Amino acid sequence: MSFEVIIGIEIHCELKTKTKMFSGAPVLFGEKANTCVNEIDLGHPGTLPSVNKKAVELAIKAASAFQCEIDPVLRFDRKNYYYSDLPKGYQITQQFYPIGKNGQVVIEVEGEQKVIRIQRMHMEEDTAKQFHNDSGTLIDFNRAGTPLIEIVSEADMRSGKEAAAYVEKIRMLLDYLEVSDVKMEEGSMRCDVNISLREKGTTAFGVKSEIKNLNSISNVQKAIEAEIERQTQILLSGGKVEQETRRYDEALKNTVLMRKKEGSVDYKYFPDPNLTPIRVDENWIKEIQASLPELPDARKKRYMNELGLNDYDAQQLIQNKEMAAFYDEVCKHCKEYKLIANWIITELSAALYKQNKTMKENPCKAEYLASMIQMIKAGEISSKQGKVVFEEIMQGKDPKKVVEEKGMKQMSDAGELLSIVTSVLDANPQSIEDFKNGKDRAVGFLVGQVMKASKGQANPTLTNQLIQEELKKR
């Protein structure tokens, strides 16, 4: 018996606003507990919510990037439940009229593209954060009321790899849009995965398990693969999968039961009476959509079609918004697009990793890297010398000054080099004889002698060419 995996994902993302969804309290991470909160966030009697316009703008940006249909009327509902992290006793959300619906994103897994449909994207407020210990539970209300979007996919994914690719695509889009800082480790982007198995050839969904609060893209894939294995073993042994909420334990590399579910909770949704419907100006929506930046897929297409990069290099660059932006900046000063990509993807990435820095902290100036690459291409310095120069420009130094100070500039004048080549050949008659006898390594020896005589400044390519030419004459 073989099974088909059915996966749907709900992603919660905190929006990058200065204030909360329905109050003027600041949105700040890592502040002292309960210092970024006001009466509205705490649900004090007599307080009234007010919609954050910036949050709506960011939500429209995201919905547009996901190709969603946008509802021009903002309507909010109350999701009623009683829990210690919910000070009002309800959460303000968009149950009935999400701001976006019927969208999609395209993912790529092992060279194959696939469309993942987005059922809906709605706005809501975050809950407070709880800290459990032996003596009880502490609550930090700083997070309460933070603007969120929840992105709900259709159950279109069929493997852990597809799910990880989907989460990564959503993360990239939101990062490029600057809608969210998408820091999963800080909780500003959180994933809940619904997974079930059904016998291949059948159409009915199996009983699903929900894996809550996955905090990294790699854990999304690991958790799904572990849950597939768990459910497969249950079904093959004749058991029944029960509807459960689980979490992924990194140490055990398995999913662990949190609670069982016998059915869906009745949250008794109803329209929030304190937030009347708001019709959004259509021209404002169009202005927001017209201001969208170049998104990852469009940028990758441009890199390949206009700059001649291969699929791998283009993909590596777009994975990091700051890296792609830096690449574009260097390309303004130099047209060696492939060489630039190589230096950024390999050498710059390695240097930043060694310095424990991110691309946002990149000390390398675009014009300096471009200048160094142009010198390599022009034969003024070798690629090996380029690595020495690169270390210096990572310290903020001008590559031209570095080359001058270190006496690195290559000898590329044919007449000057020919004089050295002639002297080397005259001093090594045995190498000339070896070459005539078909010993090609003689050329390498002679190139080395010229490099030694020129103190490493001879252009290797031109040196090799001149030696070959002179050898044929003797």
Image (cartoon, rainbow, N blue to C red):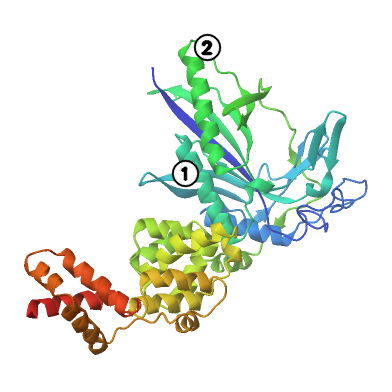
> Is residue 87 visible to us here?
no
The image quadrant of residue 212 is top right
Instruction: Say which residue appears at 83% left-offset and 44% top-offset.
Output: 140
Q: Nearer the viewer, mark 1 or mark 2?
A: 2
Instruction: Say which residue appears at 16% left-offset and 81% top-offset.
Output: 426
Number of callouts in the render? 2
Residue 166 rendering spot, x and y as whole percentages: 50, 45
| Mark 1 neighbour class, 10 Å CA radius: few under 14, some 14 to 19, many 20 or more | many
Residue 89 rendering spot, x and y as whole percentages: 83, 37
Residue 39 rendering spot, x and y as whole percentages: 90, 51
Nearer the observer, 444 or 267: 444
| Mark 2 neighbour class, 10 Å CA radius: few under 14, some 14 to 19, many 20 or more | few
Residue 267 rendering spot, x and y as whole percentages: 74, 32
Q: Which mark is residue 375?
A: none
Instruction: Say which residue appears at 78% left-offset and 33% top-offset.
Output: 81
> Mark 2 highlights which residue?
239
> Mark 1 highlights which residue?
116
Q: Pick out the residue farthest to the right.
A: 45
> Is residue 193 visible to us here?
yes
- Under mark 2, the amino acid is Gly
- Quarter of the figure with the N terminus: top left
Q: Earlier in the sequence, mark 1 or mark 2?
A: 1
Nearer the observer, 339 or 391: 391
Element under label 2? loop
